[in-house]
C-alpha cells in the first residue's frame, strides 16, 4: 500500500468511525412510574439526531446538538445519559481535531459509568478511550488490543456495543499487521450490523475491510469491499460515506496503476462533496488526484 493510500485510509477511518456507534443506547424508554422524564426522553431523541448528523459528516451541527444534549443530561443528573452523550461528543471533537477536549469527554464518560456501577457501559467507555489512543498514536497497538480484549468480556447485552468492540479489535489488529485476524474481527461486526439492519454501520465495516485488504495487497478484494460500502450508502443516502468510499477507491486504483479509473473515482468523490456543499473535502480530493 502506498503512503498516500495509507494516509487517506487513516484520515477517513478517523472520520467514519463516527458512523457505527451513534445508534447505540443502553437505556430503554422508562415505564410510566409517575416520574417526570420529559427532558430525558427529549434529550435521547436529540442525541440520536446529533449522532445521525455526525454519521453524515455534518460535524459542526452535530457538535452543537450534542453540546446542548450534554447540558440537559447534566441538568437531569442522569449518569447513563451523561456517559453516552460524552462518548458521542468526544468522537465529534476528535474528528474536528480537538483531541484534548475529546479525551476529556471520554474520561468524563469513564468516571460517570464507574460511579454508576454499570460495568458494561464502563467497559464501552474504556474501549472508546483506547480506540482514541490508537488513532492518535498515544498508545501502542498491542496495549490497545489487550485492553479491548479485556474490556469486551464485560459487553454482553447490547449488540451494537458488541459490534463496536469487534471493530476496535479489528483496528488494533490492522495496526499490528495481522490482516487476516483484523478482517475476521470486522466481519464479526458486519454480521451484527447486517442482521440488525444498521446499514450505515455495515457500510463502515466494509470500508474498513477494504483498507485492511489494500494493506495486504489484495487490490481486487479492496475494490469489492468498497463496492459493497457504496451499495449500502446509496441505500441510506449517506453522501459522506459515498464520497469517502469513492475517494478511497481512487487510491486503490492508483495503487494498481489504473490511472484512468483512479481519476474517474476521484472525480465522482469531488462531485459528491460539492453536491453536499463541502468545498474543503472537494478541494482535498482534487489535490489528492494530482499527487504523483
Image (spheres, rainbow, N blue to C red):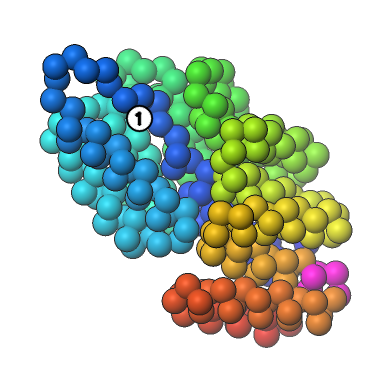
Residue situated in front as seen by the camera: 238 or 144: 238
Question: Image check: 10 left or right of 74?
Answer: right
Residue at (53, 43) in percent of width and height:
20
Q: Give the range drawn in magenta.
A: 253-257
Give the quadrant of residue 109: top left
Residue 12 visible in this rendered orientation of the protein = no
Residue at (34, 55) in percent of width and height:
62
In this rendering, the answer to whether 51 lies above or below 57 is above
In this rendering, the answer to whether 74 lies above or below 234 is above
Return the x and y of residue 16 as percentages of the image width and height.
54, 54
Return the x and y of residue 282 as percentages of the image width and height.
54, 78
Pick the quarter of the image with the N terminus: bottom right
Overall secondary structure of the magenta section = helix
Residue situated in front as seen by the camera: 65 or 173: 65
Residue at (25, 27) in percent of width and height:
79
Give the quadrant of residue 114: top left
Question: Image check: 16 left or right of 265?
Answer: left
Residue at (83, 53) in percent of width and height:
221
Return the x and y of residue 222 as percentages of the image width and height.
79, 56
Residue situated in front as seen by the camera: 20 or 183: 20
Question: Image check: 1 left or right of 275?
Answer: right
Return the x and y of residue 224 as percentages of the image width and height.
80, 56
From the image, tell me which residue sits under label 1: 110
Residue situated in front as seen by the camera: 216 or 220: 220
In this rendering, the answer to whether 73 lies above or below 239 is above
Q: Which residue lies furthest to the bottom in this view?
A: 290
Taking the magenta stretch, the answer to whether it contains residue 280 is no
Pick the quarter of the image with the C terminus: bottom right
How busy is the neighbourhood of tag 1: few (under 14 within 10 Å), some, or many (20 plus)? many
Amino acid at each position: 500500500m502506498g503512503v498516500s493510500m495509507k494516509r487517506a485510509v487513516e484520515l477517513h477511518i478517523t472520520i467514519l468511525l463516527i458512523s457505527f456507534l451513534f445508534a447505540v443506547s443502553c437505556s430503554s424508554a422508562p415505564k410510566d412510574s409517575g416520574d417526570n422524564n420529559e427532558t430525558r426522553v427529549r434529550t435521547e431523541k436529540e442525541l440520536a439526531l446529533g449522532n445521525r448528523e455526525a454519521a453524515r459528516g455534518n460535524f459542526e451541527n452535530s457538535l452543537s446538538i450534542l453540546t446542548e444534549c450534554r447540558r440537559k443530561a447534566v441538568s437531569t443528573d442522569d449518569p447513563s445519559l451523561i456517559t453516552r452523550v460524552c462518548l458521542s461528543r468526544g468522537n465529534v471533537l476528535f474528528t474536528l481535531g480537538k483531541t484534548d477536549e475529546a479525551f476529556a469527554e471520554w474520561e468524563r464518560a469513564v468516571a460517570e459509568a464507574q460511579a454508576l456501577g454499570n460495568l458494561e457501559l464502563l467497559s464501552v467507555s474504556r474501549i472508546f478511550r483506547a480506540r482514541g489512543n490508537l488513532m492518535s498514536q498515544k498508545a501502542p497497538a498491542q496495549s490497545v488490543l489487550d485492553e479491548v480484549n479485556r474490556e469486551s468480556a464485560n459487553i454482553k447485552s447490547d449488540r451494537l456495543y458488541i459490534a463496536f468492540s469487534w471493530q476496535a479489535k479489528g483496528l488494533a489488529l490492522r495496526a499490528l499487521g495481522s490482516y487476516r485476524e483484523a478482517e475476521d474481527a470486522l466481519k464479526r461486526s458486519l454480521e451484527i450490523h447486517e442482521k440488525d439492519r444498521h446499514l450505515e454501520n455495515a457500510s463502515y465495516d466494509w470500508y474498513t475491510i477494504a483498507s485492511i485488504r489494500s494493506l495486504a495487497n489484495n487490490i481486487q478484494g479492496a475494490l469489492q469491499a468498497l463496492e459493497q460500502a457504496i451499495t449500502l450508502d446509496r441505500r441510506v443516502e449517506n453522501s459522506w460515506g459515498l464520497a469517502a468510499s469513492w475517494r478511497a477507491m481512487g487510491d486503490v486504483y492508483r495503487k494498481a496503476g489504473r490511472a484512468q479509473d483512479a481519476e474517474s473515482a476521484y472525480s465522482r468523490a469531488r462531485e459528491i462533496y460539492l453536491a453536499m456543499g463541502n468545498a474543503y473535502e472537494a478541494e482535498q480530493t482534487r489535490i489528492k488526484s494530482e499527487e504523483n
